[in-house]
């Protein structure tokens, strides 16, 4: 007699519940991460659900119910496989698009905002400002479009915080252009274009994980640009932002950004 296959639900249930707890108590507290929070809840809930389906497979005796549960499991397995393939493809695009190809002497750099805590720049924004400062010091004829509005929990616009930093580090005010209305990357590009002369050379300054989407949206708005990446500090921050960027790129492909 053929022995029926046993499934082990406990690891999935524990992992799913632990992920839900981390999402609820930690991820939701991070600034500007609302969409990623909802995705993390859904993903961890799916893991817990998969464990529950395995539990039913172990304990249900009704063949009809077992067939339905098994179909649900197969659907989740196929869906997970497709998601893994999509994740790999999109992450390849993100990683391949982060190389630096900025040439010296550009007419403009567009520096993209990344969040404040009150008036204090986040670590991500600090990295972008530092990269922009280095370029502006070496290329004294380049102007900077500082792009970023005022979000929730921010006492000033991100563009204003960038202006203060760059002026405080010796960059002349007449080289700095303030774009303080944008609330996302698509608006960064659309509103920044208004300050850039036709045919001008442009460098986009942003975090390395953000450059693929930034350049794609720039091209959609008629801006042909090279890129100057700012390194993301700490491996755990980098990992989180690369995962979050996957969902942002998918949203862009779907026309939601």
Image (cartoon, grey):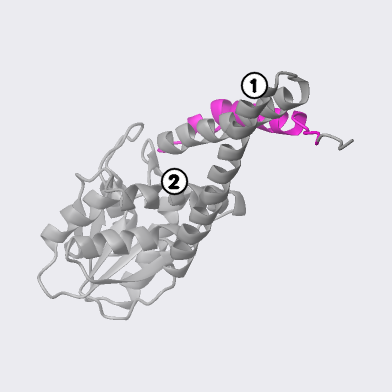
Question: Left or right: where does residue 7 sit relative to residue 211?
Answer: right
Task: Look at the numbered disc 1 and give the secondary structure of its residue.
Answer: helix
For residue 226, what is the image quadrant?
A: bottom left
- Whether 217 is drawn above or below 101: the answer is above
Q: Residue furthest bottom?
A: 104
Judge left or right: residue 234 versus residue 54.
left
Look at the image and give the residue range highlighted in magenta. 5-32
Residue 64: percent from the left, percent from the top?
64, 22
Left or right for 97, reference 107: right
Residue that badge 2 annotates: 122
Residue 102: in magenta span: no
Badge 2: few (under 14), some or many (20 or more) residues near its Cα, within 10 Å? Answer: some
> Left or right: where does residue 190 sit relative to residue 79?
left
104 and 48: which is toward the camera: 48
> Residue at image x 11%, y 58%?
194
In the picture, residue 108 is in which quadrant?
A: bottom left
**What residue is disc 1 on?**
65
Query: Which quadrant is home to the N terminus?
Result: top right
């Amino acid at each position: 007699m053929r022995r029926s296959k046993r499934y082990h639900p406990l690891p999935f249930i524990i992992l799913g519940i632990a992920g839900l707890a981390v999402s609820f108590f930690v991820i939701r507290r991070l600034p500007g991460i609302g969409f990623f929070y909802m995705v993390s809840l859904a993903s961890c809930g799916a893991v817990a659900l998969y464990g529950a389906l395995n539990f039913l497979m172990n304990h249900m005796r009704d063949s009809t119910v077992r067939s339905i549960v098994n179909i649900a499991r197969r659907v989740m397995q196929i869906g997970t496989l497709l998601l893994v393939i999509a994740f790999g493809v999109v992450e390849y695009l993100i990683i391949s698009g982060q190389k630096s190809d900025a040439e010296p002497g550009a007419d403009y750099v567009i520096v993209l905002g990344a969040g404040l805590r009150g008036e204090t720049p986040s670590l991500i924004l600090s990295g972008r400002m530092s990269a922009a400062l280095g370029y502006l010091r070496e290329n004294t004829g380049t102007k900077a479009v500082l792009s970023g509005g005022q979000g929730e929990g921010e006492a000033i616009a991100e563009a204003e915080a960038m202006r203060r930093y760059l002026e405080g580090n010796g960059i002349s005010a007449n080289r700095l252009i303030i774009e303080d209305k944008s609330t996302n990357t698509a608006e960064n590009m659309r509103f920044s274009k208004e300050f850039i002369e036709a045919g001008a050379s442009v460098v986009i300054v942003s975090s390395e994980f953000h450059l693929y989407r930034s350049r794609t949206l720039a091209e959609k708005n008629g801006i042909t640009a090279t890129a100057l990446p700012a390194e993301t500090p700490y491996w755990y921050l980098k990992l989180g932002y690369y995962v979050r960027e996957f969902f942002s790129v998918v949203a862009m492909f779907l026309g939601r950004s």
